[in-house]
Image (tube, rainbow, N blue to C red):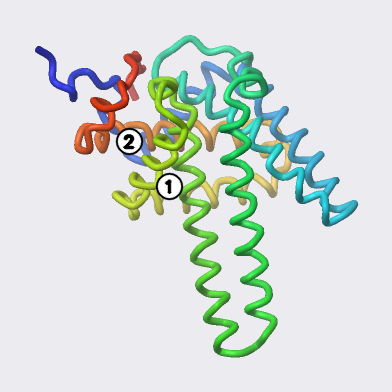
Amino acid sequence: MASRADALPPASAGASLGGAARAALSDLYYHSWRLVPANVVWSVTAIGVLVAVIVAPVGLVALPALALPTAGLFRMAGRIVRGQAVSFWDAADAWRNDVRATLALGVGLSLVAIMLAFNVATGLLTATLLGWTFATLAFWGLIATWLYAWTAWPILCDPARSGWPVRDRLRFAALLALAHPARIGAMGALLLLFLATSAVAIVALGTVSVAIAAVIATRFVLPAADRLDVRLGFAHERGLQEATASDD
């Protein structure tokens, strides 16, 4: 009888951060005609949200809409990592299926980020020790939110875990971030540097950079998630679906 470890998808073989980045570039080469259009859809949505915010602060309510193209990119990334057939319509499917789960995560992340950013600003403007302490705590909260987002999206959109309740997937993402703070922190720092650099060359950010970041995160997170899965028994309790992944 096969063990639970044997039943896990091949992504559980593991990947270093450098290996995930190299594999993501290879994925871009083979799937560029699928990933680039999905990245463009993300960019168009982001521009629409930005315009709404500039026109009126109430435009911030449109921020969670960015979760839909984000989920589309991570759906494609998850299928790539799991070795499944991939098409652009996998990204478009995020606008029709699991919309409530996607928007729930988008709303949650947006509210927390906005609240913490406001607290950072107000804490610094007070110019007092208490205010700076408050701002520092809020800043660390922003970092934690950033890291959780890059952990939660790959797990929420993992085709091998699509049968899990959404709450279990999001809770598992939090457990993974807590179990590997240094590794997840390194990934978050790399992705922040990569996206900030790409923002200088706006064309790259609008066409490929977000897609590459999504694939890097997925290739890095899912192997770690599968290993933690074996330790905690989530696969056994929730029924991790069989999937075939390509080699890193």
Pick the residue in front: 168 or 47.
168
Residue 177 higher or lower than 121, as above or below: above
At 83% from the left and 53% from the top, the residue drawn is 58
Provide the secondary structure element on which disc 2 rests: helix
At 31% from the left and 37% from the top, the residue drawn is 224
Looking at the rendered structure, the kind of residue marked 2 is Ala
Q: Which mark is residue 43?
A: none
Residue 206 higher or lower than 177, as above or below: above
Q: Quadrant of residue 13?
A: top left
Pick the residue in front: 240 or 89.
240
Residue corresponding to mark 1: 187
At 31% from the left and 49% from the top, the residue drawn is 180
Marks 1 and 2: in contact by CB < 8 Å? Answer: no
Asked if residue 185 lies left or right of residue 97, the reply is: left
Looking at the rendered structure, the kind of residue marked 1 is Met
Provide the secondary structure element on which disc 1 rests: helix
Q: Earlier in the sequence, mark 2 or mark 1?
A: 1
Residue corresponding to mark 2: 225
Asked if residue 95 lies left or right of residue 7, the reply is: right
